[in-house]
Amino acid sequence: MTAYNNFVRDYPTRCNQLLNKFFKDAGENNLEVTLLLSMAASGFVIPYARLSESAHPTKDAESFKVAKDKLDAELKKPFLASELWGKDRPDSWRFGQLENIDGDPDSWGLKQFEALSISEQARDITRILRNALAHGNIYTRGNPHIEKLVFLSRVEHSQPELGYNCLIVSPLDLKQFMKNWFDVLGRVEMPARTFVESDLLEEIIA
C-alpha cells in the first residue's frame, strides 16, 4: 500500500486518476454515473469538509492555510468565472428553488429552471452539491440513459417550509467540474503529512 503525503491533495488526486482511468470502461457498462457520483461523494465532499470547516477534527483548515485561502478565493468568485467551471456559458447547469418535493421529479417543474447566471457564487453552487451528496439528495432524469442529475439542498435547515435549492447538470458537465476541482487542489503546494492507506479508516473513525 502506498502512502499519502498529504490527504487533502493526494486523495482527490487519486480519485481523479480512478475517474479518468475507468470512466470509459464504466460507460461501456452503463456505470459511468455510478462511478462519477462515487468519486464526487468522496473526492469532492471529503476535501471540501476538511478545508472549509474550521472545527473539523483534522484541523486541515489551519494546517493547510494556503490551500484553504486558495479554495476560499475561488468560492468567492461567480461560479462561471471561477476555475471550478471557467466558462462564460453554463452549458447544462440549471438552478432554481422548490417549495416542496412531493410526487415524482417530473412534476416539480424542473424545465422552468433557468441557466446559471454570473450572479451565482461558486460557494453557493458547491454548498448545494456538498449537501446533496452528503445527505443523498440526488435524483436522475432520463431513461434508459441518464441525461440529467438533480441535486437538492434545503434553503435553510431551521426553516424547512422554505423548501430546497436545486441544481441540475448533465453527467458530462459534472465530470468536467470534478476535473476542475481536482486540478485546483492539485496545484496548491501543501506541506507533507504522510498517511498509509491502511491508517485512513482509523483517522476517519477517530
Image: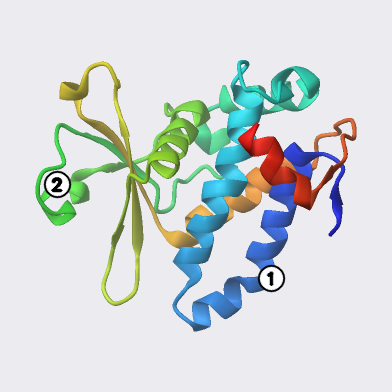
Task: Identify the residue position indicated by label 2 in the image.
Answer: 108
Foreground of the two, 136 or 177: 136
Above or below, 205 relative to 201: above
Q: Residue at x 49, y 62 (%)?
A: 172
Q: What residue type is labelled 2?
A: Trp
Display coloring:
rainbow
Snapshot quadrant of residue 125: top left
Q: Which residue is drawn at 63% across and 63% down?
A: 19
Residue 177 shows up from this direction: no
Q: Residue at x 64, y 53 (%)?
A: 179
Residue 21: mark: 1
Q: What residue type is labelled 1?
A: Lys
Residue 131 shows up from this direction: yes
Distance CA(mark 2)–CA(mark 1):
36 Å
Snapshot quadrant of residue 148: bottom left
Snapshot quadrant of residue 47: top right
Which dot, 2 or 1, sits closer to the camera? Answer: 1
Above or below, 50 relative to 156: below
Above or below, 31 relative to 178: below
Mark 1 burial class by Cα count in 10 Å: few <14, some 14-19, many 20+: few
Mark 2 burial class by Cα count in 10 Å: few <14, some 14-19, many 20+: some
Foreground of the two, 50 or 109: 50
Above or below, 92 relative to 95: below
Q: In which quarter of the image is the C terminus?
A: top right
